[in-house]
Image (cartoon, helix red, strand yellow):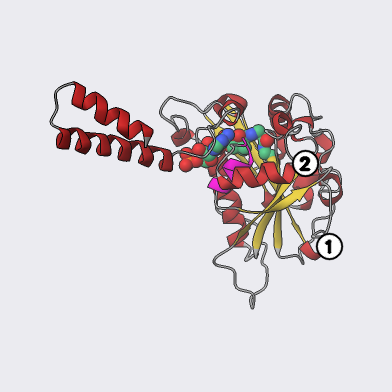
Amino acid sequence: MARLQLIKHNAQLSGLRPELATYIGTAIEGLHQYSRFRSDEKPPGRASAVVVRPTEPRRPAVTAIKVRHTRPEDIPELIALQARVYPDIPAWNRRKVREQLEVFPQGQIVAEGENGLVGGASSLIVLWDDWAESHTWKEITGAGTFDNHNPLGRTLYGAEVFVDPNLQGQGIGHLLYNGRRALCQAMNLKRVIACGRLPGYRAYSHDMSAEFYAQKVVWGDLVDPVLSFQIKEGFSYCGVIENYIPEDHNSCGYASLIVWLNPDYHPEQPVTIPEHIAL
Ligand SMILES: CC(C)(COP(=O)(O)OP(=O)(O)OC[C@H]1O[C@@H](n2cnc3c(N)ncnc32)[C@H](O)[C@@H]1OP(=O)(O)O)[C@@H](O)C(=O)NCCC(=O)NCCS
């Protein structure tokens, strides 16, 4: 109200009629209140520093990119790409990726551009009841060999997804997630479940728990490079898991448990794993 009085006073001093000064003052105060109502209670602070989003028009590269199944000859290139994506986390070795391809070739996909591979997404099928209460990445993926793959399960478990660091934010992750959803639907699986890294958490770990951090990301008050992407992709957040990948220092070992339910799932029909699945 003090501001309203001041506006009216200044308007009168500049020679305006009292009723006109009151009218202008009330309008300005109203606008001020409206802008306060629209903005967040707190300024974004450090949240805006977590991720630098590209300012150029997005998706310039995506039209030239195809998602296809992984082939044995992709293995060296895929591992080299993964090592560039995670400089601080040990990359897979050739034997493990070969095993993944032998165990469940349908679940392994890559994104390929004109100059080679630009991303990959790996999955296995699990009986979710075996893992729902607690698991780590190492346990559920058989330390990356996928020897826990169980065709009797009804859950596609996302073990890994990554995009070339120079091409992130251009829609390639979205294409890979489309591919993963296509696999889930083609096999009549009930859902996709994954545990996503929380690489933005370390910067907040002294101020709040991982769970509260993840909730703030879900509420839209913070941005996390992985969880924000997954929420945009239509996944639901189910909670955090501790010590999921202990070597993942940026996430302080935490991951968020997320799920996407297949809208076309038919519980009365079996899971089918065709040799070839169109992506
Ligand atoms: C997470 C990752 C796979 C996403 O792939 P991407 O190609 O960068 O994502 P996309 O460009 O397809 O983004 C899809 C949507 O998510 C949003 N999104 C992507 N990254 C985001 C971020 N850092 N913050 C907020 N939103 C983001 C995009 O805005 C886009 O939404 P829009 O279509 O409305 O614009 C990729 O950033 C990556 O490889 N990260 C490092 C590896 C990693 O941690 N993988 C996760 C393992 S659990």
Q: Closer to the camera, 151 or 193?
A: 193
**x, y percent for residue 7:** 28, 29
**x, y percent for residue 56:** 43, 25
Mark 1 = which residue?
130
10 Å crowding of disc 1: few (<14), some (14-19), many (20+)? few
Asked which secondary structure carries label 1, the reply is: helix
Q: Residue at x 14, y 23 (%)?
A: 15
The number of numbered discs placed on residues in the rendered structure image is: 2
Residue that lies at the very extreme toward the top in this rendered image = 14
Q: Residue at x 64, y 78 (%)?
A: 268
**x, y percent for residue 176:** 58, 43
Picture quadrant where residue 116 is located: top right
- The span shown in magenta is 224-232
Mark 2 = which residue?
254
- Asked if residue 233 lies left or right of residue 105, the reply is left
- For the N terminus, the quadrant is top left
Q: Main secondary structure of the magenta part?
A: helix
